[in-house]
Image (cartoon, helix red, strand yellow):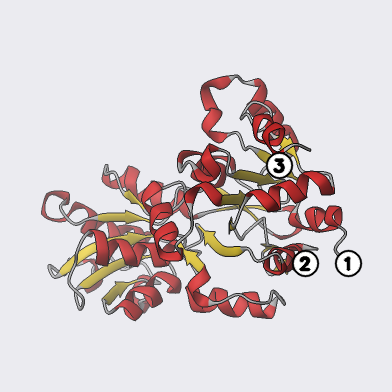
Amino acid sequence: MDPSVFAAMTRKSNPIDISSKETLQHLIDHYDNFLFDCDGVVWLGDELIPGAAEFIQLLVDNGKQLAFVTNNSSNSRNTYFQKFARLGIPNITKDMIYPTCYSAALEVRDQLKIPLGSKIWILGEHGIEEELQEMGYVTLGCNDPKLNNLDLDSSILEVDPEVRAVVVGSTKDFNYMRISSTLQYLLYNDKSIPFIGCNIDKTYPGPRGLTLPAGGSVVNYMAFTSERNFINVGKPSGQFLNIILQDRQFDRDRTLMIGDTLYTDVKFGNDGQLGDGRGSLLVLSGGTKLKDLQKLIESGGSKEDLIPSYYAESLGQLAEVYGVEK
């Protein structure tokens, strides 16, 4: 296939199905850097998607640079690093991993310029707490035992005036005390404390075909309740992408985003003009199925920012197409 023909085919209204070795080889030749979503792309829950490790190794063998970009704020980079090792995915280092708990910490330090040692209120899980503490902040809320049981006379509902930001992300312990205490900070001092939301994902793919609520449901609940907007530090935030590209020294035109969600992963690549405007690949192993993509294409051009340039069944299918042995 002539490379110019390959490039011309990647119109958003006509995404390429990467189903032959020739097409995949052109893709590998065209990009130097690969950004991966995790849930629904590399794994489902604690189960590795078959063939994902082999495809990642194929890219490494071809001299490609990788980064893993997940809107899941529950786990820190350290926890993800351990998960990659546990699932048998080689050659992954901590500096290649970008969960939104880390991007939230970067927002607090580098964009909001909040001094190290300041107090930050968290509605979320240990990943946010760990990243903020590692960066040098004092964290409040999160897993404080006072948040476990309903007690409207509890001292934890009293605002600490030294709190400088509120970070909200996914949590499986979303209860009335966590909602109520976080609301006090979001309303405090005429809503002046910065409100950081770790992602906008409504759902994520769980094991056994389950669809589970994601962090965006928590973030948007608090935005609705407090009548506030939030700083989105997850995909498809362009600021998040710029941080990754600069940090990893990736050439934007030679970078491809691989994900399973249209309104976060694909939009992340498209809005960010990765791959000279053609840098998004959808895999159908997670939250988006072929019928969803077809329906989007048939709906017309109003949502072109959600249409990928390429699609494939899964990373495992790509490895199989290439002839990689499992």
**Mark 2, secondary structure of its residue:** helix
Residue 89: quarter of image: bottom right
Amino acid under disc 3: Tyr
Residue 158 drawn above or below residue 136: above
Q: Quadrant of the N terminus?
A: top right
Q: Position of residue 32 (x, y in %)?
A: 60, 57
Which residue appears at 64% of the width and 48% of the height?
A: 30
**Mark 1, secondary structure of its residue:** loop
Residue 170 drawn above or below residue 266: below
Amino acid under disc 2: Glu
Which residue appears at 51% of the width and 45% of the height?
A: 274
Q: Position of residue 185 (x, y in %)?
A: 22, 59
Kindly identify which numbered label has been placed on residue 325.
Answer: 1
Q: Position of residue 237 (x, y in %)?
A: 41, 48
Q: Is residue 202 visible?
A: no
Q: Tags 1 and 2 in contact by the CB under 8 Å rule?
A: yes
320 left or right, relative to 275: right
273 left or right, relative to 112: right
Separation of marks 1 and 2 at Cα, in angstroms:
8 Å
Q: Tags 3 and 2 in contact by the CB under 8 Å rule?
A: no
Q: Which residue is mark 3?
A: 311
Badge 1: residue crowd in 10 Å (few <14, some 14–19, many ≥20):
few
Q: Is residue 322 visible?
A: yes
Q: Quadrant of the C terminus?
A: bottom right
Q: Which residue is mark 2?
A: 54
**Mark 3, secondary structure of its residue:** strand
Which residue appears at 21% of the width and 76% of the height?
A: 116
235 left or right, relative to 152: right
In this orientation, which residue lies closer to the viewer: 21 or 16? 21
Which numbered disc flags the more N-terminal residue, 1 or 2?
Answer: 2
Q: Position of residue 91 (x, y in %)?
A: 64, 76
Amino acid under disc 1: Glu
